[in-house]
Every structure is written in C-alpha cells, then in structure tokens.
C-alpha cells in the first residue's frame, strides 16, 4: 500500500472512531498538516513538529497496525490537539495534561478497558493552573511514559505565563 492509500484509510479509521477523531481529521486536512510514520525515541508513541507535521513512531506502528490499533487513532487526536493549542501551550505540563486527558478518555471509550492506575488518576485531575495539580500530572506522566518522555523539562504553565509567574508569583 502506498502512502496516499494508507493516509486515506488512516483518516477514515480515525474519523469513524469518534467525534474527536472527525474533528482532528478535519483540522489536519484544512491546515494541510503532513501525516506519516517516522522513527523516534521509545518514550513517545507519536509526535508533532513546529512545521505542522504529525508522525506515528515506527518503533510501535506500521501502516498496517496503525489502521487496526485504537491507540494509533487516539495519539492522532492527542497530537492534533497540540497543533490546535499552539506551541506555547503544547510545550507545557498544562497543555500535556489537557491532551493526555483527551487521548486517554477517548481510548477508554473505544476499548472499554480500565487503564493503568497512573492514567486513571491523571483522568481525575482538573485541567487548571494550580501548580501542585500540574506537578502531580507531571509525576503521573513520567511514571507512565518514563524519564525520557521528558515531562520534567516542560514548564508547568505555557512559557509566557510561567515567566510572568516567576516574576510575580501570581497566575493571572
């Protein structure tokens, strides 16, 4: 199967999975986001780039497996959500918490399975700017994805808000 055939089938699978999937596919098509497969470090299942690309990690997915694995569809929704958030929000624990919750709520809905305890707890956290809450989210992400996921390097808030907080000790 060639790249174009695979891409149409993949879009169809994601869109047919849920309303979130339909919205993500629509966004990608409207914004001409390049979608493909590329090798990455083991701690990520998929990733986006600042040049508006989305890739599934070939360490875990092939063209064939991406068409059958609901996680490959929910990762698409997660990473496209980051593209919608914009760089500053996506590159923060706050942005990750929001995207992880979207991804794993959808995965639960599609598979009807109980997730690992750290993911179940992550789904109970409010998406807000409370620093202790975001620190807990970062710990849970690291527990699930490992040190090399590098959530520890992200600011808790989007970088402009993080810098403001560092100077004022207030979240506006």
Image (cartoon, rainbow, N blue to C red):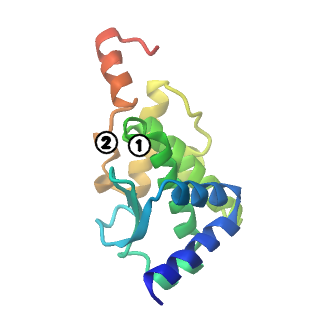
Q: Is residue 64 above or below residue 156?
A: below
**Residue farthest top in this picture:** 168
Q: Residue at (46%, 59%) from the top-left corner?
A: 32
Instruction: Report which quarter residue 18 is drawn in.
Output: bottom right
Q: Residue at (58%, 61%) from the top-left corner?
A: 25
Residue 23 is situated, as x and y percent measured from the top left of the image, at: 63, 54
- Give the structural element (helix, strand or loop) at label 1: helix
Q: Residue at (36%, 12%) from the top-left corner?
A: 169
Residue 139's mark?
1
- Give the structural element (helix, strand or loop) at label 2: helix
Instruction: Report which quarter residue 55 is drawn in.
Output: bottom left
Residue 12 is situated, as x and y percent measured from the top left of the image, at: 63, 73
**Residue farthest bottom in this picture:** 1
Residue 152's mark?
2
Residue 73 is situated, as x and y percent measured from the top left of the image, at: 57, 66
Q: In this view, does 145 lie above or below 10?
A: above
Q: Nearer the viewer, residue 64 or 115?
A: 64
Give the mark, 1 or 2, whose residue is nearer the N terminus.
1
Residue 76's mark?
none
Q: Residue at (38%, 32%) from the top-left corner?
A: 156
Q: In this view, does 43 lie above or below 150?
A: below
Q: Nearer the viewer, residue 4 or 115?
A: 4
Q: Nearer the viewer, residue 74 or 84?
A: 84
Residue 157 is situated, as x and y percent measured from the top left of the image, at: 40, 29
- Is residue 62 left or right of 14 when viewed as pictured? left
Q: How far apart are marks 1 and 2 (CA)?
A: 8 Å
């Amino acid at each position: 199967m060639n790249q174009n055939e695979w891409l149409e089938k993949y879009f169809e699978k994601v869109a047919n999975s849920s309303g979130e999937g339909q919205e993500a596919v629509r966004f990608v098509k409207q914004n001409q986001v390049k979608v493909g497969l590329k090798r990455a470090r083991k701690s990520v299942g998929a990733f986006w780039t600042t040049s508006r690309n989305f890739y599934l990690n070939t360490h875990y997915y092939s063209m064939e497996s991406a068409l059958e694995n609901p996680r490959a569809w929910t990762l698409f929704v997660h990473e496209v959500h980051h593209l919608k958030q914009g760089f500053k929000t996506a590159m923060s624990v706050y942005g990750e918490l929001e995207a992880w919750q979207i991804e794993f709520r959808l995965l639960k809905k599609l598979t009807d399975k109980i997730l690992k305890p750290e993911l179940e707890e992550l789904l109970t956290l409010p998406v807000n700017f409370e620093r202790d809450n975001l620190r807990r989210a970062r710990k849970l992400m690291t527990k699930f994805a490992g040190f090399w996921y590098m959530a520890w390097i992200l600011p808790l808030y989007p970088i402009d808000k993080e810098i403001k907080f560092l100077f004022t000790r207030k979240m506006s």
